[in-house]
Image (cartoon, rainbow, N blue to C red):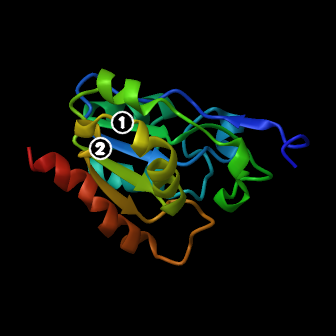
Amino acid sequence: MTDLVPASISFPPIAGKDAQILILGSMPGIKSLQEQQYYAHPRNAFWPIMASLYDFDLSLDYAARCQQLVDNKVAIWDVLKSCCRQGSLDQAIETDSIVANDFLAFLTQYPKIKSICFNGTKAEQVFHRYVLPTLTTAQQQIIRHKLPSTSPAHATQSFDDKLSQWQITKQNMEAD
């Protein structure tokens, strides 16, 4: 199927020089790729969760929401640089097409990252398989947390349940 499905290409990271928390998805979905914006699907809970945790207006435009994350020392990126996938679901990612982003370079460029939070199981699994072995010993020691996916495809948990679990991103910041 890889020959028939064009590769999906991820976005550059959003990160400020003093980023401390890195939130990783697997690969942007179709709506995000079309809009060229992280978490663009209107039913994705990512932006409502971030607005609630970091106290900003959800109606801000995309650039302003991204700036709010940067101002709060939160970086976002995806584990995958590219992959082939029919549709938006992580289960549809073709394993033999996976190319991971360069986290060795990223974590070297952003040395203040002290916690990595995975937006769902697939991001964590792919990171552990394709990225973790490429990192320095110190980078491998960065604290990692798997959080419930904010994707509308994962609606088994309520917004409030997800928000409660995502609090760890803010708690890690407050531990400074």
- Name the kind of residue labelled 2 in the image: Gln
Residue at disc 1, secondary structure = loop
Instruction: Determine which residue is flagged by label 1.
Output: 135
Which image quarter holds the C terminus? top left
Q: Which mark is residue 70?
A: none
Label 1 close to label 2 by CB (< 8 Å): yes
Give the image location of residue 50, x and y in percent. 37, 50
Q: Nearer the viewer, residue 15 or 45?
A: 15
Which residue is drawn at the image coordinates 57% and 30% (left, top)?
Answer: 11
The residue at which mark 2 appears reads as: 140
**How busy is the neighbourhood of tag 2: few (under 14 within 10 Å), some, or many (20 plus)?**
some
Q: Earlier in the sequence, mark 1 or mark 2?
A: 1
Q: Residue at x 39, y 24 (%)?
A: 105
Point 63% across, 50% down: residue: 41
144 or 52: nearer the viewer? 144
Say left or right for 46 vs 112: right
In the image as oriented, which residue stretches furthest toward the right? 4
User: Is residue 162 depicted above or below 33 in this figure?
Assistant: below
In the image: residue 158, left or right of residue 113: right
In what element is the residue under mark 2? helix
When the figure is inspected, residue 62 is found, relative to residue 119, above or below; the finding is above
